[in-house]
Image (spheres, grey):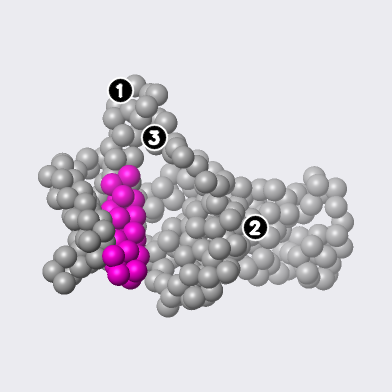
Amino acid sequence: MIQLGEKIKSLRKRKNVSQEVFANYLGVSFQAVSKWENGITMPDVAAIPAIASFFGVSTDELFDFNLYEIEKNVSAIVDEHSKYWDTDKRKAERIIRDGLKKYPGNDVLLNCLIGVLDLPEQSGEVISTAKALIESTKYDDVRLDAWRILAEAYAAQGEMQAAKDAIEHIPELYFSKLEVAARLLLGEERYLSAQKQKRLSAETLVDMLLITGNYLKEQGDTEKANSQFDIAQKVIDALSEDFTETRCFKTSFSERLRDQRDELTCLLNK
């Protein structure tokens, strides 16, 4: 495997920029860049995303890994962490952090990490990591998800204007990739896309009914509020009778919406 310093030197020459220009971009001295390129020292890990962004490559490419093998291994780590996302967030976090030790700076793993950290307790790490991803990732889906999680972190800290600013970077779409695939593709691809979209749509519907119901309750409109809670309960009951497609999900619909179901129980019994 090529050494990191050699890779930086190769990319810099390909881009036809001097050590001084590159150093100024990173906010370091050109002597520091020279030491990296000659294998005397290594860049700080925090500088890796910025270096990759400057050269327009992924952090994996910067380290000259076999990208196919990396993607396959990262996918396996993500799948493993997803088994515990609903039931044991701390175990899911440990799996991702262990993955990042093997593949430091990997965009997909970093995105998973900020999605599993607790808010507001770990909002500082979420915000700094999300900002770095937004600046450096070459994946549009990772960038958009980072904006979403960044907005959640700001909201958890009570920084509502910052949350609103982050939300403005998220496009408002009235369709999803899964929905389009379910409508247009054929056979198993159509079926699996529909299964995934069905679950996501149901979860979103329950969340929106709870939000509107709680707002109406705060406004004193108990009758309309209860109508929203009743509908949410019916959605949960109806989907609880559905089977779980294990090729798509690790947990059942009921397990996934455990917190919402408990919240509804309290609201409807008051």
Q: Whole-percent x and y of residue 166? A: 57, 61
Range covered by the magenta-colored residues: 201-221
Quarter of the C terminus within the rendering: bottom left
* Magenta-drawn stretch, dominant element (helix, strand or loop): helix
Q: Secondary structure at mark 3?
A: helix
**Closest to the observer: 267 or 194?**
267
Cα distance in 3D space between marks 1 and 3: 15 Å
* Residue type indicated by callout 1: Gly
**Closest to the observer: 85 or 178?**
178
Which one is earlier in the sequence, the residue at label 1 or at label 3? 3
Q: Whole-percent x and y of residue 19? A: 84, 60
Q: Is residue 27 left or right of residue 218?
A: right
Q: Whole-percent x and y of residue 189? A: 34, 28
Q: Secondary structure at mark 2?
A: helix
Q: Is residue 19 left or right of residue 132?
A: right
Q: Determine whether 123 is above or below 248 in the image.
A: below
The residue carrying pointer 1 sits among few (fewer than 14), some (14 to 19) or many (20 or more) residues within 10 Å by Cα, namely few
Q: Is residue 143 magenta?
A: no
Q: Is residue 204 magenta?
A: yes
Q: Whole-percent x and y of residue 150? A: 52, 64
Q: Secondary structure at mark 1?
A: helix
The residue carrying pointer 3 sits among few (fewer than 14), some (14 to 19) or many (20 or more) residues within 10 Å by Cα, namely some
* Residue type indicated by callout 3: Glu
For label 3, the residue is 179
For label 1, the residue is 187
